[in-house]
Image: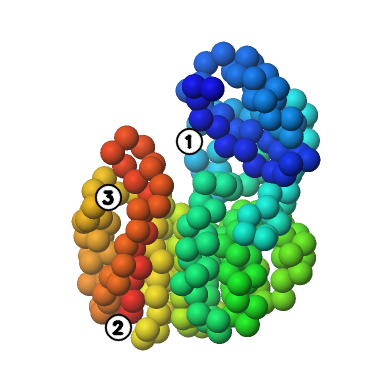
Amino acid sequence: MGYAFDVIGSKDKAVAIIDSKIENEKQVAQDIMKQHKNVKSVLKKKSGRTGVYRIYSLKLVAGSRDTEVIHKEHGCFLKLDPKKVYFSPRESTERKRIAEKVKPKDSVLVMFSGIGPYAITIAKKHPKANIVAIEINLDAVIYAEKNIKLNKIKNIKNYCWDVREARYLGKFDRIIMPLPETAIEFLDSAFLSSKKGTVIHLYGISNEPKKFSDLRKKVKEMAKTFNIKYKIISDQKVLPYAPKMWKVRLDIKIL
């Protein structure tokens, strides 16, 4: 096949998501469903991620209108409907990377937590960690609650809040900000939830993947504004985002 697509779900039931630029969408959908018998629906992106909830507008091209599936990664089960919430199977490796950085008894804040993939991956690996997940999309929060129960997780508190309200929850050892398009705009809220030694995993979009100097500059400006002392302890290219653009991560330690 000469086109890329994502498959979300299980060997029994999955949905495929194709890009908005794909032509002959009906034929493409039929080809996908023919070669992947578990794909029961094919959805096409109508636009990029938009709105407050940063979700894709998707249309059904072929198959069942029931697009709710259960996706499995790293031993975690994640129930979702991609027409209602954002989820990327391509970020599976990154979620595992972050879970491996967390210490067993860390207090962890996951901003923009969606259906819970970061929080649940961490909770599975570190059952003694204390994890707080904050998400503004009620549909995603409802799915996160289902996923917490589905995975029999006991150490996640899940809130349908704006992340700016996180300041009322105390200080955390580790803060995850996995919304690359706009996370930098909420870095001040992460600062308010930090203490000496806190590590912030900030995601962003960079056109300089070797140095991330554009994102580093924004962090420096915000830290100066809020009189925050910090150092960047590591960085990571995560995924291609657009031509010559990357989704990246900066790991920021508060001093």
Placement of 180 over or under 18, stated as above or below: below
Q: In this rendering, does residue 225 appear at all?
A: no
Residue 152 falls left or right of residue 208? right
Q: Position of residue 3 (x, y in %)?
A: 50, 25
The kind of residue tagged 3 is Pro
Q: Secondary structure at mark 1?
A: loop
Q: Are marks 2 and 3 in contact (CB under 8 Å)?
A: no
Residue designated by label 3 = 209
The N terminus - image quarter = top right
Q: Position of residue 66 (x, y in %)?
A: 78, 35
The kind of residue tagged 2 is Leu
First reached walking from the N terminus: tag 1 or tag 2 = 1
Q: CA distance from mark 1 to mark 2?
A: 37 Å
Residue 22 falls left or right of residue 28? left
Residue designated by label 2 = 255
Which residue is depicted at the point 64% across and 16% down?
A: 26
Q: CA distance from mark 2 to mark 3?
A: 25 Å
Placement of 213 over or under 196, stated as above or below: above
The C terminus - image quarter = bottom left
Placement of 14 over or under 27, stated as above or below: below
* Callout in the foreground (1, 3): 3
